[in-house]
Image (cartoon, rainbow, N blue to C red):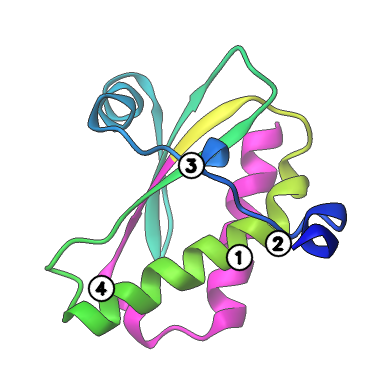
Amino acid sequence: MEQAEQTGQTFPKSDRLLKRSEFRRVYDAGKKVHGRLFTAFVLESDSDALRIGLTVTRKVGASFERNRCRRLLREVFRKHRATAGRVGADVVVNAKREMIKAAYADVEAEMVKLLTRIRR
């Protein structure tokens, strides 16, 4: 575990939005960014932390498909969050149905595009 922490490969709870009130705040005051695989809501914050919240509704698919979407989004965000730099923001990502059949590379490319937009 210490090796993962030293290389920055962890995804602690402090990097996630967990409470409904946090999600609501981002939905209400954040900017909407549309993509082919997901829609993101971005709200700048005062801290240096970039936090993410994920929503994958039943409209997307069966439970195993929704879980795959969440795993993909978490992993891609964890690997590429440095792309956004030291920007403080809360991001809520809503997966779309198209994500079920998307390859890892497609999800990765769209997340990198989102993170570079956040940096600007």
> What x and y, as percent, mark residue 64?
26, 83
**What residue lies at 38% left-to-right and 78% top-to-bottom?**
68
Tell me the amino acid under the disc marked 1. Val
Q: Residue at x 46, y 71 (%)?
A: 71
Residue 53 figure quarter:
top left
Mark 4, residue position: 97
Q: Is residue 101 above or below residue 44?
A: below
Read off the magenta span: 92-120
| Sequence-first disc among 4 and 3 | 3
- Whether label 4 touches label 2, CB < 8 Å: no
Q: CA distance from mark 2 to mark 1?
A: 5 Å
Mark 2 vs mark 3, foreground winner is 3
Contact between labelled residues 1 and 4, with CB atoms less than 8 Å apart:
no
Task: Name the amino acid type tagged 2.
Answer: Lys
Q: Given contact means CB atoms under 8 Å apart, are the residues at marks 2 and 1 in contact?
A: yes
Q: Nearer the viewer, mark 3 or mark 1?
A: 3
Most foreground residue, 62 or 16: 16
Q: Identity of the amino acid at label 4? A: Arg
Disc 4 versus disc 1: nearer the observer: 1
Dot 2 crowding, Cα within 10 Å, few <14, some 14–19, many 20+: some
Residue 110 image position (x, y, % from top left): 56, 63
- Residue 6 picture quarter: bottom right
Q: Amino acid at mark 3?
A: Arg
In three-dimensional space, the C-alpha distance between marks 4 and 2, rounded to whole angstroms, equals 23 Å
Q: Which residue is disc 3 drawn over?
A: 16
Comes first in the chain, label 2 or label 3: 3
Q: Earlier in the sequence, mark 4 or mark 2?
A: 2
Give the residue at mark 2: 79
- According to the image, label 1 marks what residue? 76
